[in-house]
């Protein structure tokens, strides 16, 4: 008996002249197309049968689980591990997206393409309907604010918050055009930070109530000393973290490592009402709040660029684990290396995709040279 037949037998299935059967009920294997156990030839043959609308039993699904073994390097454990999702019917991945202050640069394309490959693999293995991929847009940013303020001073109509949203609409549209040109699938969900301010405020209130954050001079800060495992992801010492974080010296901080969850806004900055006055969220709270709302307190994979390990991802972990101590936040952490030019991050050089001439040119297979060049590297390889 071949492996395919053995798998069918374990599931209580057998094949016949009219199709594939489970016990005494005809079951259409359209549902099995979500499971990569079956070879493409077998799947193609089985897909010709008409569906009955019945789903497979849990026993059948377990027996027909994928033969594909996915191994991922987990930054958290510093080892390559066999990936086993928390729930095969609901595989969840969150990747930190861009700050949309201008056109996408070449460096923005690296994580998009790295995690696009993983997203496609997960969809193939577990089924497109069973994988949720969330990648955010950070649209709370000083550069976006400056553009919105300049437009307002030039006579543009609308509040500063509305002009910020208008500017972000432009840059997100450009981003989509460029990433589409590179052949990347769009994520399942693409939340914008400004659309989840309420969730961020609620998480900050919870952290204060649990003793992990405090208010000082209109700011709310996370108390790093309240989380014993701070620094474990990046493996940095306290001295290294202080140096690497470009810590702002502020008299209202209890500890130099404490980071901002909420900060005040004056009349020339966008802001939202909160228990601590009109203000705006700090960068790190965004992803913690949005991932919780969209994926839950524990999900499978969290990804991003290597430069985000510290402080951004360390801070995300601290916030999320303290706000939801019963959860584990992300099971697997993955980081791609950076693109650099003479040792400088691509984001510092203003080398935007449209200026580099790689995207949107309308040529045959447009975007392919960039995609092929980046795919020639492994996830852990940098490029200078």
Image (cartoon, grey):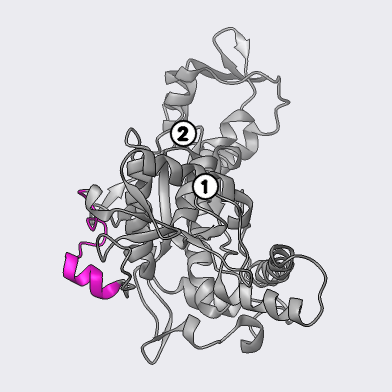
**The C terminus lies in which quarter of the figure?**
bottom left
Q: Quadrant of residue 173?
A: bottom right
The span from disc 2 to disc 1 (Cα, nearest Å) is: 40 Å
Q: Which residue is mark 1?
A: 275
User: What is the number of the mark on residue 223?
Assistant: none
Which span is picked out in magenta?
A: 228-244
Report helix, strand or loop for mark 1: loop
Q: Is residue 220 above or below residue 58?
A: below
Front residue of 204/110: it is 204
Q: Residue furthest bottom?
A: 342
Report helix, strand or loop for mark 2: loop
**The N terminus lies in which quarter of the figure?**
top left
Q: Which residue is mark 2?
A: 88
Q: Residue at x 41, y 73 (%)?
A: 377
Q: Is residue 39 visible?
A: no
Query: Where's residue 23, x and y in %?
Result: 54, 9
Q: Specify few, some or many for label 2: CA neighbours under 10 Å numbering under 14, 14-19, or 20 or more.
A: some
Taking the image as shown, residue 140 lies to the left or right of residue 237, namely right
**Residue 236 sits inside the magenta stretch:** yes
Q: Residue furthest front?
A: 217
Q: Quadrant of residue 105?
A: bottom right
């Amino acid at each position: 008996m071949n492996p395919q037949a053995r798998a069918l037998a374990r599931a209580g299935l057998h094949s016949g002249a009219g199709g594939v059967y489970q016990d005494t009920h005809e079951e259409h294997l359209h549902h099995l197309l979500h499971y990569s156990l079956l070879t493409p030839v077998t799947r193609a043959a089985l897909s010709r049968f008409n569906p009955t609308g019945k789903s497979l039993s849990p026993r059948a699904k377990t027996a027909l689980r994928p033969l594909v073994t996915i191994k991922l390097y987990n930054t958290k454990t510093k080892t390559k591990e066999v990936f086993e999702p928390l729930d095969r019917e609901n595989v969840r991945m969150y990747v930190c997206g861009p700050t949309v202050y201008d056109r996408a640069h070449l460096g923005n394309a690296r994580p998009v393409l790295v995690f696009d490959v993983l997203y496609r693999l997960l969809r193939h293995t577990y089924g497109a309907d069973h994988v949720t991929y969330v990648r955010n847009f950070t649209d709370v940013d000083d550069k976006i604010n400056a553009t919105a303020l300049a437009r307002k001073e030039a006579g543009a109509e609308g509040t500063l918050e509305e002009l910020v949203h208008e500017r972000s609409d432009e840059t997100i549209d450009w981003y989509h055009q460029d990433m589409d040109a590179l052949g990347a699938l769009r994520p399942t969900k693409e939340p914008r930070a400004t659309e989840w301010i309420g969730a961020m405020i609620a998480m900050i209130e919870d952290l204060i109530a649990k003793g992990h954050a405090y208010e000082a001079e209109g700011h709310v800060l996370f108390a790093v000393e309240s989380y014993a495992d701070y620094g474990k992801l990046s493996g940095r010492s306290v001295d290294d973290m202080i140096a690497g974080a470009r810590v702002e010296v502020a008299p209202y901080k209890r500890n130099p490592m404490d980071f901002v969850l909420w900060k005040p806004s004056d009349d020339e900055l966008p802001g939202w009402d909160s228990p601590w006055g009109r203000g705006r969220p700090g960068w790190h709270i965004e992803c913690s709040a949005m991932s919780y709302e969209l994926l839950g307190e524990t999900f499978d994979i969290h990804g991003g660029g290597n430069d985000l390990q510290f402080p951004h991802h360390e801070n995300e972990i601290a916030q999320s684990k303290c706000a939801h101590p019963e959860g584990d936040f992300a099971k697997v952490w993955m980081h791609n290396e950076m693109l650099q030019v003479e040792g400088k991050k691509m984001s510092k050089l203003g080398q935007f995709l449209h200026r580099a001439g790689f995207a949107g040119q309308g040529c045959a297979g447009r975007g392919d040279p960039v995609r092929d060049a980046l795919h020639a590297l492994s996830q852990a390889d940098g490029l200078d």
